[in-house]
Image (spheres, rainbow, N blue to C red):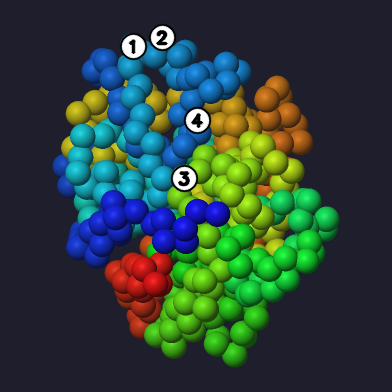
Amino acid sequence: MKSKFSYTLASMLVLASLVLTACGGGGGGAGPLQKIGAGEGEVSIVAWAGYIERGETDPAYDWVTEFEATTSCKVTVKTAATSDEMVTLMNEGGFDLVTASGDASNRLIASGKVQEINIALIPSWDTVDERLKEAPWQFVDGKHYGTPYVWGPNVLMYNTDVFPEAPTSWDVTFVEMTLPDGESNSGRVQAYDGPIYLADAALYLKHHNPELGIDNPYDLTQAQFDAVVALLTAQRPLISRYWHDAYVQMDDFKNEGVVASGSWPFQVAYTEVPVASTVPVEGATGWSDTTMLHVDSAHPNCAYMWMEWSLNPKVQGDVASWFGAVPAVLAACTGNELLTDEGCATNGLDDFDKIWFWRTPTAACSTGAGDCVPYSKWVEAYIAIISQ
């Protein structure tokens, strides 16, 4: 079993740098592009693993080659393992686009690192799921800051040899216990690597400790926040690794004895041991990702071409199939050979209203009422917890 103290110094520095991230203002002061011109020959994208495939992993999954041939825009990809890493990379600059989840997108908008987009330049905009067109993680002050990509839940992945029946609660990762195979869960479970994981703990307490009065797991008073920190501090000895690399997590399930963890459908589909997933009784957090344009993009024409391409139903269906996600374009849910007509339902199409999508916590709370613990305090608390 790998050490529970395997969190890297580089990751710690990424998290610490976020405390200094600006929290005011808005992106793209010059206004959005008004006309798409000739492509600049390239486009650089920061993306989650598996989001931009060119057939190198599996020839059946390639939505880059045709785009490059059609537009002459060469695609380069920088894979990011966490939302915090995406924010850091976009702060450093040199990229055109990012596939940001809600806990990154609002920070990028607030700090002026992404620009408003002109949806009139994206012909397929009208095909986007109505629930996503003005989602608060990309639509701010009446402005659109990106095109929806795919979404899904953070599921509980478990080894079916250890759990003949699906766990009904997240307590298998939060509370020390004997598992169905007669062994303790200590050192055999994982947790997501990032301050946003505090929301998972808040959701757990929302169900099990209603006296705390938690409503939204991203809107925490100081007392609620302290209870979340106490739960994660008690959980710390159980955790073999705070995972952020999907492929490393799959290897840990295969080779390191890990049997349960919060995960993505992507790992459930490709882990080489018998695993399954469930959304326990407490519910789940989740991600709805947006392709966003850097305020200083050097290749905005190719970037707009990619945003339009990303909404192609074939592309949407292929991405959803590969990652185990739900497409932003619902037309992709039928007629896609890879996804199949059952794929959207399997990946959680009907669970949209049950998912607490990642958001950046602010002192103002999501309601604007104030008195919530801001993200900078989440970062500080998370670093203290994992450093034990």
Residue matched to label 3: 245
User: Residue 134 at what x, y percent from top left?
Assistant: 46, 51
> Which residue is denoted by mark 1 in the rendering?
72
Whether residue 106 is visible: yes
Mark-to-mark CA distance, 2 and 4? 17 Å
**Circle 4 sits on which residue?**
311
Q: Nearer the viewer, mark 4 or mark 3?
A: 3
Three-letter amino acid code at disc 3? Asp
Disc with the residue nearer the chain's start (1 vs 4): 1
Q: Residue furthest top?
A: 69
Q: Secondary structure at mark 3?
A: loop
Q: Which residue is mark 2?
A: 69
In this picture, is 68 found above or below 204? above
- Graded by Cα atoms within 10 Å as few (under 14), some (14 to 19) or many (20 or more), the crowding at tag 4 reads many
Q: Which badge, 4 or 3, comes first in the chain's sequence?
A: 3
Taking the image as shown, residue 126 lies to the left or right of residue 335, namely left
Which disc is residue 263 wearing?
none
Residue ranking furthest to the left: 30
Q: Tags 1 and 2 in contact by the CB under 8 Å rule?
A: yes
